[in-house]
Every structure is written in C-alpha cells, then in structure tokens.
Amino acid sequence: MTQKAAIVGGGVIGGGWAARFLLNGWDAAVFDPDPEVERKIGEVLDNARRALPALYDKPLPPEGALTFHDDLATALEGASWVQESVPERLDLKHRIHADLTALAPAEAVIGSSTSGFKPSELNAKGARAIVAHPFNPVYLLPLIELVGDPDECDRAAEILRSVGLYPLTVRKEIDAHIADRFLEAVWREALWLVKDGIATTEEIDEAIRMGFGLRWAQMGLFETYRIAGGEAGMKHFMAQFGPALEWPWTKLMDVPEFTDELVDLIAGQSDAQSGHLSIRDLERLRDDNLVGIMRSLKQSGSGAGGVITAHEAALEVPQIADLPVTLDIQVPQTWTDYNGHMNEAHYLEAGAKATDQFMVMIGADADYIASGLSYFTAESHVRYLNETHEGARLQVETQVINGEGKKLYLFHNLLSGGGLVATVETLLLHVDLDTRRSCPPAPKVAEALVRIAAAHAVLPKPEGLGRFVGQRP
Ligand code: NAD
C-alpha cells in the first residue's frame, strides 16, 4: 500500500520534504495556511523532478499523489510520517506539536525540521516529536540529523533510508545539532572577514569553492586532515596545527553586531556577486552541480555517492518485452552539451552501464570480479539515430548476439521518447584479472550466458547489426 507523509508547513524546507517523499512513491498531504502554498510547492517539485531522478541509473518508483488540506486532521489521516517545517519560533512549534501529538496516528513518526531547538524544548509541553533536521535542497542532499528518543530515531532512520536519505543520529541533544554548529563557526568568521574589510562575499566564496569545499564533499574534515599529516598521520597533523588554535587566527566566539551598515555591506556585495541571476537560476545551477558531483561520487562510493548506490540497489527496473532492460535513466543535465542534446560520449556511457548490468544478470558481478575474473571491452560501434534531451527517460534493451566461450557480443538499443535514438554494439572478451589475458568464464557465468543467448537467438536480428562507419573515407 502507498505510504503517506503529512507535510506541516510547506515553505522551502517543507516543499523539499514533500518532493523527496513524492518522488519516492509516497503520497504527500500538505497543511499550510499560506494561499501561495500550491505554487511554492509546485516550483520546488519542478526542480526536484529534474534533479533527483538524474542521480540514479534506475527509475524511482511512480510518483505519489500530492494533496493540499485546510484541515490539519485530514492531512494527518493515515500518515506514517509527519514532518513539521513551520518557521523557527518556539511558541509556534509548541502550538503545532500539541496538535500533532493529539491528532497524528499513534504509529506515525513526528519529525521536526528545526535547525536549532532540542527535542526537550520542542516536547516541553508534552509533545512526542523527534528532530529530523534536513539540508536544503531536501530532495537532493541526503543528510538528516536525528535527535531524540533512541527507539523513535531507529524507526525513523529505517524510513528515511528507504527514501534515499542518510540519517545521522546525534548522540546527545545540543542547540543546533552537529552541522549547524559547525556552519555557525564558519558564518561567524565570514561576517568578521567582510566587516573588517579583509574579503568580499565573492572572495570568501572563492576561498571555499576553489579549495577546501571540494575536499569536504568527498572526505569531510578529519579524513582530509589525516592525509594532510602525511605518512606521520593524524598525531603529527595535530602537533603541527594544534597550537594555531591558541593564536589569534580566528575571532573565536565574538559575533559582529548586525548593524544596518554591516547588513548593507553584505547584501550589496552579494548583489554585485550574484544579482545577475534569479533565485530560480541559482537553484538550478546548484542542483545541476550537485547532481554532477554526486554522480561522480558514486564511482568511489564516497560520501553521498555511497548513499545513492545503496538506495539504487533496492530499486526495480521495469521490464518492457522480450529483451532485458539493462538501463533506465533520466538524462542528467551534465550529459547534455552546447547543442542542447545528449552528448555523444554519454551514448557510449549508457551502453557501458547497460553492459555492466548485463554482466550482473549473468553472475559476473562485483563478487565475481573480486574473485579475479571479468570481461574487458574489445570493440564498440555507436550509431546516433536521434536526439535526446535533459530530463528525458532513456531505456536500454540488450540483445545477446553471441555468448559462446570467451565472447560476449551484445547489441544495445537505446530508446527514448517512444523511439530508437541510438544503438551500441559491443564485443567483450572474458579475462583473468591476474594474467590480464582472455580465458573462459566460470561455469555458472557461462551457463547463465548460454541460456540467455539461446532465448535471444530466436528473436529477429537487430536492424543495423554489424554496421561500420557508413561514409566512404
Ligand atoms: P519558510 O518560511 O520557507 O516556510 C515556513 C512555512 O510554514 C511557510 O510556508 C508558512 O506559511 C508555514 N506556516 C506558518 N505557520 C504555519 C502553521 N501554523 N501551520 C502550518 N504551516 C505554517 O521556512 P523554512 O526555511 O522552510 O524553514 C522551516 C523550518 O525548517 C524551520 O524550523 C527552519 O529552522 C528549518 N530548516 C530550514 C533550513 C533552510 O535552509 N531554510 C534548513 C534546515 C531546516
């Protein structure tokens, strides 16, 4: 049965939660008195639809139903997850959580998006919420900080993982949890740097994104510092840089006063830096960059990349007809080029991913490769038959042409927009990874391959099989 999330407060963050649940097949019921809420959530959802599915090489489940309610009780009916994302005011949160505790199904998890309040503060008047603190955009960034009752956090964690999120349970409640504590220190230093005329907002952003910002997405703080210590390791690093904390490198706990002058200075510099782009343009740029970065991280499994791969393993690829569907993907923006369509290199990438999936189907999977056997590609031929674009669904069907002995000869049909957009014909040879020479596959792989090859042999041969570059040189 489709699960339901109740979204209480549908602003930037509530909209992101709604999108995250909807695109993972949950229904989402929104309660927010703002007359503009449908438009606001619609815009977040549009952004989410072009970004989240583009992280995966398999389709997400069919989208759930989105409804809007004037009555809180109806919004909460039958919900297994309730997410409160109203403005950050404790009196307001107390009022809402009293209602949620009274009206939500007893078995529903009640999460609060609060950036700063502790569960003991939220629940001071008898409510039963846990903190489930997300990061903007909630539909793309996996981290959710969980704080509160341990059993409730465990239950919450399981649900969050099922929608591709990464729950991190905070061991003890503190103001602002882990990440915002950290960001607060960075924010404080940035304010001082601008106020003291050391750097502009743009220069501070360059200092982050040209250097340590790139490190943080893939290894965080401690792992990168471990490397910085060189072969002598973490102890050496701490001996070298520890004393600096006692030097006046940072302003430590002083906070600059938010005078009109400081606010104008920062807002003015920010306008000069980014005022030529609308917030929607900036959101799209951010999302495209995040998708590109996160897709690269899948390769090594580092950080958010590992979360996507684990979630992807639980997703099903719907099959169409006789031939197996070996890839089903939404074309990411990063696969498109200056001509506004999918770049030719990615047709081959789609073929390569389809080959990888076919290898898994016949048992030549990660364990098999770890045992020292694999297939290497010897030759490929791509035919570009039609365009496909950012956001389009691209499916690959794979036919075995020959699966005898060391040979794995595949023909991939790339389908999009109801037609064939390309074919990738590819010959692989089975190899021993120690000798790097060809050898026959292990019996279980050979048998699985022969079985599929026999089933495909009775199907018509694909149009264009055996084609070479058609133009005379
Ligand atoms: P927002 O102002 O964009 O959205 C708040 C929404 O709550 C508005 O749509 C408003 O109409 C609605 N609302 C107000 N009173 C309500 C009520 N009584 N019942 C139902 N809805 C009501 O704010 P936001 O940025 O989405 O922040 C919401 C929460 O998420 C805050 O607790 C904030 O600390 C937290 N948070 C924000 C961010 C961020 O980057 N913006 C990140 C993580 C967590």
Image (spheres, rainbow, N blue to C red):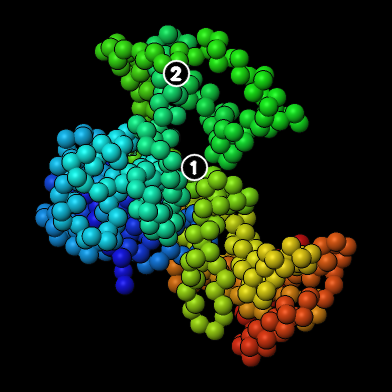
CB under 8 Å between callouts 2 and 1?
no
**Residue 219 location in percent, x, y?**
59, 39
Quadrant in the rendering for residue 363:
bottom right
Q: Rate crowding at label 2 as few (under 14), some (14 to 19) or many (20 or more) other CA atoms within 10 Å.
A: some
Against 179, residue 354 (above or below) is below
Closer to the chain start, of discs 2 and 1, is 2
Q: Nearer the viewer, residue 302 or 59?
A: 302
**What type is the residue that disc 1 sits on?**
Asn
Disc 2 on helix, strand or loop? helix
Q: Quadrant of the C terminus?
A: bottom right
Q: Is residue 343 left or right of residue 470?
A: left
Q: Nearer the viewer, residue 207 or 88?
A: 88
Question: Which residue: 40% across, 54% down?
Answer: 154
Say the numbered circle drawn on residue 145.
none
- Residue 38 lies, in percent from the top left, at 20, 51
At x 63%, y 74%, the residue is: 361
Name the residue at 68% across, 32% down.
227
Q: Is residue 364 left or right of residue 421?
A: right
Q: Nearer the viewer, mark 2 or mark 1?
A: 2
Q: Amino acid at mark 2?
A: Glu
Count of number-bearing discs: 2
Residue 83, visible in the rendered structure: no
Q: CA distance from mark 2 to mark 1?
A: 26 Å
Q: Residues within 10 Å of mark 1 (few under 14, many from 20)?
A: some
- With 159 as the anchor, is 333 left or right in this view? right
Place of residue 296 in the rendered image (x, y in percent of width and height, measured from the top left): 58, 48
Give residue 220's position: percent from left, percent from top.
56, 36
Quadrant housing the N terminus:
bottom left
The residue beneath circle 1 is: 289
Q: Quadrant of ligand 1?
A: top left
Residue at numbered disc 2: 189
